[in-house]
Amino acid sequence: MPHLAMLFEQAVDACPDNLAIESDQIFITYCDLEQRANQLAYYLMGNGVTLGSFVAVVIERSVDSYIAMLAHKSNFLILSL
């Protein structure tokens, strides 16, 4: 079964300008969502998060929570609390 990150990457490649998230009058395309998730992943890695690390995220369900869920593709685990 394909990994969530692989499925997401396929969606980004196939239709980067399609709407991925709509929440509270915020509209995010697949391309934008990938860029934001990568930005978070690089930030975390730049601050010492490495392969096998656990990262706890305390955040209400929002666009940011989806970004955090997708940032895990850098091989660390994000726990949504």
Image (tube, rainbow, N blue to C red):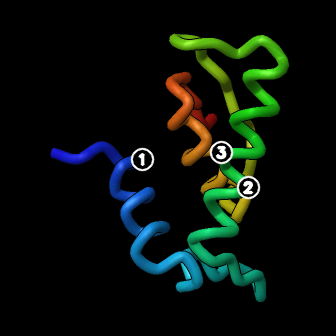
Spatial CA distance of label 1 from label 3 is 12 Å
Q: Are marks 1 and 3 in contact (CB under 8 Å)?
A: no
Q: What residue is shown with label 3?
A: 68
Farthest residue to the front: give it. Answer: 13
Q: Dividing the image into 4 quarters, which one contains the C terminus?
A: top right
Q: Where 7 falls versus 32 (above or below)? A: above
Please name the amino acid that badge 2 sits on: Arg
Name which of mark 3 and mark 2 comes first in the sequence: 2
Give left or right: position of 51 versus 56. Answer: left
Q: Where 45 falls versus 30 (above or below)? A: above
Q: Where 40 falls versus 17 (above or below)? A: above
Q: What residue is shown with label 1?
A: 5
Q: Are marks 1 and 2 in contact (CB under 8 Å)?
A: no
Please name the amino acid that badge 1 sits on: Ala
Q: Are marks 3 and 2 in contact (CB under 8 Å)?
A: no
Report x, y in % for residue 51. Answer: 55, 13
Q: Which of the numbered marks, if any, corresponds to residue 36? A: 2
> Of 25 and 74, which appears nearest the observer?
74
Spatial CA distance of label 3 from label 2 is 9 Å
- Image point (58%, 30%), residue name: 78
Of discs 3 and 2, which sits in the foreground? Answer: 2
Among the 4 quarters of the image, the one containing residue 68: top right
Q: Which secondary structure, mark 1? A: helix
- Badge 1 local density, few (<14 within 10 Å), some, or many (20+)? some
- Image point (56%, 30%), residue name: 74
Among the 4 quarters of the image, the one containing residue 30: bottom right
Q: Which of the numbered marks, if any, corresponds to residue 22? A: none
Report x, y in % for residue 33. Answer: 65, 63
